[in-house]
Amino acid sequence: MKFIYYSLAYCLAGFSFLPGNSQVTAIQLTVKVPLPDTGTTPLYIAGSFNYWHAGDSLYRMKKVSEGQYNIILPVFEGVNYTYKYTRGSWDKVELAANDSNISNRHFYSSGQLDILDTVQKWKQPVSRTVVQNPRLEKINAMKDSVLKKLQPELTKMQDLLKLYVQNMLQERPSERLHRQLDKKAMKKVHYAFTEITGLLFNAMALLTREEKDAMQKKIKYPAGKDDFLNTFLNSFNTITGNN
């Protein structure tokens, strides 16, 4: 369910150049992975920019050649980010050559960076029996359906961003065009929020009264310094077993 958070962040990042918000920049990351690499297992980047989701389809890297992948990330400028590479889960995260865990990679988003990394080795998952959770399967199916709807909208949002920037770079930017783009942008943001809150509504309907009461308590009295969204998502993940 952290999909909700990073989908919103990704959507809003595209419009963060609007007055009062942070600037957005593009960071290109290229990574070399151990050979042989058939490319049948997807490669992802996970980090502080997507709340460390190990198999986020929005952060799946593109194979450009044998053993080499890349991705362009929209991130807020002037921020320290940490990250790692995975094969879709933390059971298949990158390791050091001696099989030990590695420290988080990091970059400072300033200008248009072009980063080249190398993965030494992949962690091998331990075989285990998976217990099916019908309710969690239903929630994940709803989540995947919403994500499928939102992915083309995210592309359209980036296209709008391009139009914004092109107008701003003119000697005399058109305020009329800017307002027109604002209207289109707000419609797409509204659509994204509607889809996500609809997902939440349907997911919440699957909770028992006792589970809802437990979530209410955690939201009202959060542990530590967690903000509302983190508290909500963590409690929801705990209750549904979506760890």
Image: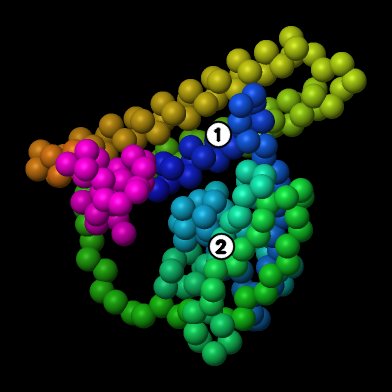
Residue at x-position 60% and y-position 15%: 183
- Residue lying furthest top: 176
Q: Is residue 102 left or right of residue 138?
A: right
Q: Position of residue 33 (x, y in %)?
A: 65, 75
Q: Position of residue 147 (x, y in %)?
A: 46, 41
Residue at x-position 61% and y-position 26%: 20
Query: On residue 12, which mark appears?
Result: 1
Can I make out residue 159 in this image?
yes
Name the chief secondary structure element in magenta.
Answer: helix
Tell me the crowding category of disc 1: few under 14, some 14 to 19, or many 20 or more residues within 10 angstroms, Cα based: some
Reply above or below: 70 against 77.
Answer: below
Q: Quadrant of the C terminus?
A: bottom left
User: What is the CA distance from the residue labelled 1 to the residue labelled 2?
Assistant: 21 Å
Q: Secondary structure at mark 1?
A: helix
Query: On residue 83, which mark appears?
Result: 2
Q: Is residue 23 magenta?
A: no
Give, as a three-letter code, the residue at label 1.
Leu
Q: Secondary structure at mark 2?
A: strand
Q: Position of residue 9 (x, y in %)?
A: 51, 40
Q: Earlier in the sequence, mark 1 or mark 2?
A: 1
From which residue to which does the magenta span run? Answer: 217-243
Reply above or below: 164 against 57.
Answer: above
- Residue lying furthest right: 171
Reply above or below: 170 against 104.
Answer: above
Residue at x-position 9% and y-position 43%: 210
Residue at x-position 62% and y-position 50%: 79
Query: On residue 230, which mark appears?
Result: none
Q: Is residue 1 left or right of residue 235?
A: right
Q: Quadrant of residue 170?
A: top right
Q: Is residue 111 left or right of residue 128?
A: right
